[in-house]
Amino acid sequence: MISIESRISEAVIAGIEALYGQKVPEKMVQLQETRAEFEGNLTLVVFPFLKMSRQKPEDTAQQIGEYLVQNVPDVVSRFSVVKGFLNLVISPALWIKMLEGVNAEEKFGFQPVTENSPLVMIEYSSPNTNKPLHLGHVRNNLLGWALANVMEANGNKVVKTNIVNDRGIHICKSMLAWLKYGNGETPESSGKKGDHLIGDYYVAFDKHYREEVKELTAKFVAEGMAEEAATEKAKQEAPLIVEAHEMLVKWEQNDPEVRGLWKKMNEWVYAGFDETYKALGVGFDKIYYESNTYLEGKEKVEEGLEKGFFYRRDDNSVWADLTKEGLDEKLLLRSDGTSVYMTQDIGTAKLRFQDFPIDKMIYVVGNEQNYHFQVLSILLDKLGFKWGKDLVHFSYGMVELPNGKMKSREGTVVDADDLIAAMVANAKEMSADKVKKLEGITEEEMNEIARIVGMGALKYFILKVDARKNMLFNPEESIDFNGNTGPFIQYTYARIRSILRKAAAEGIEVPATLPTEAELSDKEISLIQHLNGFTAAVCQAGTDYNPSCIANYCYELVKEYNQFYHDFSVLKEEDINKKIVRLALSSAVSKVIKNGLGLLGIEVPERM
């Protein structure tokens, strides 16, 4: 469906050619919403056309306004001139057509994805296999999923991908602790999720390791060593860390026993992760594992070394000199030949490029890694990846909870599963009075509504904030049924669905063609204009990589609808034409709420 702005832009371009004999590009036509103190719906900025008209701004605006009213009366019904601004009153019939279009299009506001659409790959989540997902991962996953939806809604093919950090000394710590203290414990025997079980052994390793370091430090100090030096020596020589390093060497050498244990414990973790991802409502099209990518990265670094992009130092380590790019020197391979994170990212990029014809690569990673991605972009470009130079680091800030609001399993990091369970429990408690009043409600349906509302509260509260900012997540505030919250928007959706069900019970359905006889109020026109703005909000969210645009759009739309609902009767309206238009308006708002929240990964309950 062609937007109202597009219709006016086309008419203005035709008018400039007819009036002044010059063709102008569409970007020169500047339209904005008319300020509240003036009559009109959209305002055309006339100043760009003064060189063509060679007249005063007021006269130029008057001529263009007269042209539009004479030539496209179905678009512009009248106008007024305020200095260099042309305020346009849109034809009521066009607003009705616009409303018909919203209701006719299942995916109103979205661009179609075609065979020729560019392919965007988005990496998010990136967990370690030695511990469960935490609050930081929650923000990461929700942002990644929402961004993928937004990019697809803007007409891109999207591949959602995850890179799992499944190798390294931290993994060996959990494995070693399980061997020493586990007594064969499994997720089945303990009743724990696999990721939590492995996380417990990572914590156990740290506890026993610190005890060993403390004992060794005391021993070295007693032997006459300075305390700082004694502590450093103890950290390196503690039996547990020595064993963990030995295990890592065996892993790198493909020791069958170590590899077998590694595979078994990782499978426990992946099963646990999958439960959390399912609860969050996120997923992936392709998962990569660092245990597969690090060797690929080493190969690409060796290739770069041969081509003179990198250099080897006397200690056999390999570096990239980026001083000409205004950065520093970056380590790529240690002196013993082992890889670093940068090497692994290069290897992962190589595999992805082999697997998919990527046009754009977006990494959803915290802002503490800003420098890392500056460097990675330069290195990938040097190594010949066509999207390397233009890779996007979707950088986001920290998310924290108010002290004491929700205790974590460790006392320091807020566990994702604990957070999800608490949000659903809070939603059930907060909405109990409302939900119990619903006719014929079952326990199962009450639990499902609590899940939808609790997860909606969590997702909306996190996604409404600009990702680049640090944020404080307040669980209680997020489930408020008033204000800028998910439940407030969900409740409005459920209310509209109730209105439409009652209308259907009266035998009134919204027709495809609406009655043009119904006179629209300013509030109804404003609401249709808000609906018309959904396309622009989706476009802006994609251009700026900013899902919060969608959240804030939905909130403004819902506020506008609730004001309309307060001021105007829908089901009790006696004029049948007005009633049908208002039902159509309600239906369109519910559709856009559902589609908008859907981009954020938020479900909506049909009743609440």
Image: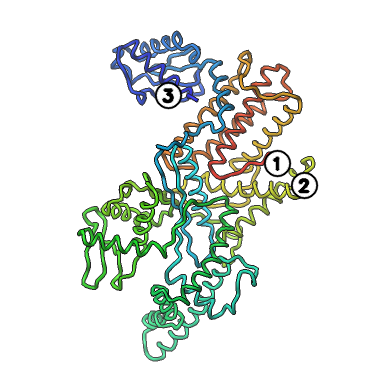
Nearest to the observer: residue 342 or residue 307: 307
Q: Tell me the element at label 3.
A: strand
- Label 2: few (<14), some or many (≥20) within 10 Å? few
Q: Residue 478 in the image: state x and y as whole percent.
A: 60, 48
Nearest to the observer: residue 262 or residue 599: 262
Q: Amino acid at mark 2?
A: Thr
User: Mark 1 or mark 2, which has the lower sequence index?
Assistant: 2
Which residue shows up at 37% across the image and 90% down it? 224
Q: Residue 143 in the image: state x and y as whole percent.
A: 49, 48
The correct choice, above or below, for 235 with respect to 108 in the image is below
Residue under circle 3? 31
Q: Which mark is residue 608?
A: 1
Q: Amino acid at mark 3?
A: Leu
Q: Residue 524 in the image: state x and y as whole percent.
A: 60, 23
Query: Quick one: which residue is furthest to the right in this view?
Result: 440
User: Mark 1 or mark 3, which has the lower sequence index?
Assistant: 3
Which residue shows up at 31% across the image and 64% down it? 298
Q: Amino acid at mark 1?
A: Met
Nearest to the observer: residue 581 or residue 388: 388
Q: Residue 167 in the image: state x and y as whole percent.
A: 43, 68
User: Mark 3 or mark 2, which has the lower sequence index?
Assistant: 3
Q: Is residue 397 visible?
A: no
Q: Which mark is residue 442?
A: 2
Q: Is residue 159 left or right of residue 578?
A: left
